[in-house]
Amino acid sequence: MSSTQEAQQDETGGAAGQPSEAELRAAYEAELSRITSADMVLQATVSLLNLGARRLGLVGGPDPAAPEQGTPERDLEQVRDAIDAVRGLMPVVERRAPQEARPLRDALSQLQMAYARESQSTAAPPPAQAPAQAVPTPPQPQPDTATPGPGPAESSGRLWVPGR
């Protein structure tokens, strides 16, 4: 490394053309002073909806130019977490950015419906049952409708019946 490169690196704190730590800190502070909590809530909501849709396989997918990527892995637990988080953020969105609430609610509804469909289709199928064979049922005694008697609970004394 030449002495001019070393001097340049010392001044900036990094390689030539890279911002120093002080410059990065100043840029971060400027961004924090500009952004609002409502902006962050909106950004988090949109990011969670996009992540949930991706984990459900609704968006994204293999890049034809990069076949080694494969298909995105479906993860219903992450989708459920994203849905729950967005549902928790929606009251803030509705209060702080009501004009943005409707499209986000629509996206959340679509994600919830797709999640419900996917979770039902991946639910374990009921165990296979043997073919039902005709099993004769014993004849049921016909109740005597002429003189109804006390039932088992009443005759045991555990049931209070008005007038008796």
Image: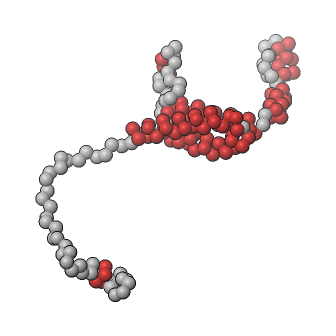
- Residue 15 in sight here: yes
Query: In the drawing, does residue 135 fall left or right of residue 66?
Result: left
Q: Where residue 133 appears, x then y in whole percent?
A: 14, 51
Query: In the drawing, does residue 67 fall left or right of residue 128?
Result: right
Query: In the drawing, does residue 139 fall left or right of residue 43?
Result: left
Of 143 and 99, the residue lying toward us: 143
Residue drawn 16% across the image and 70% down it:
141
Of 100 and 20, the residue lying toward us: 100
> Which quadrant would the C terminus be assigned to in this image?
bottom left
Residue drawn 39% across the image and 42% down it:
123
Q: How is the image coloured?
A: secondary structure
Which quadrant of the view contains residue 100? Answer: top right
Query: In the drawing, does residue 110 fall left or right of residue 132?
Result: right
Residue drawn 63% across the image and 36% down it:
102
Which quadrant of the view contains residue 137? Answer: bottom left
Of 163 and 64, the residue lying toward us: 163
Q: Where residue 95 appears, x then y in whole percent?
A: 72, 43
Q: Where residue 122 appears, x then y in whole percent?
A: 40, 39
Residue 111 vertical position relative to residue 137 in the rendered view, above or below? above
Q: Residue furthest bottom?
A: 164
**How many numbered marks are there?**
0
Residue 84 vertical position relative to residue 8 in the rendered view, above or below? below
- Residue 48 in sight here: no
Q: Where residue 57 appears, x then y in whole percent?
A: 49, 29
> Which quadrant would the N terminus be assigned to in this image?
top right
Residue drawn 85% across the image and 13% down it:
4
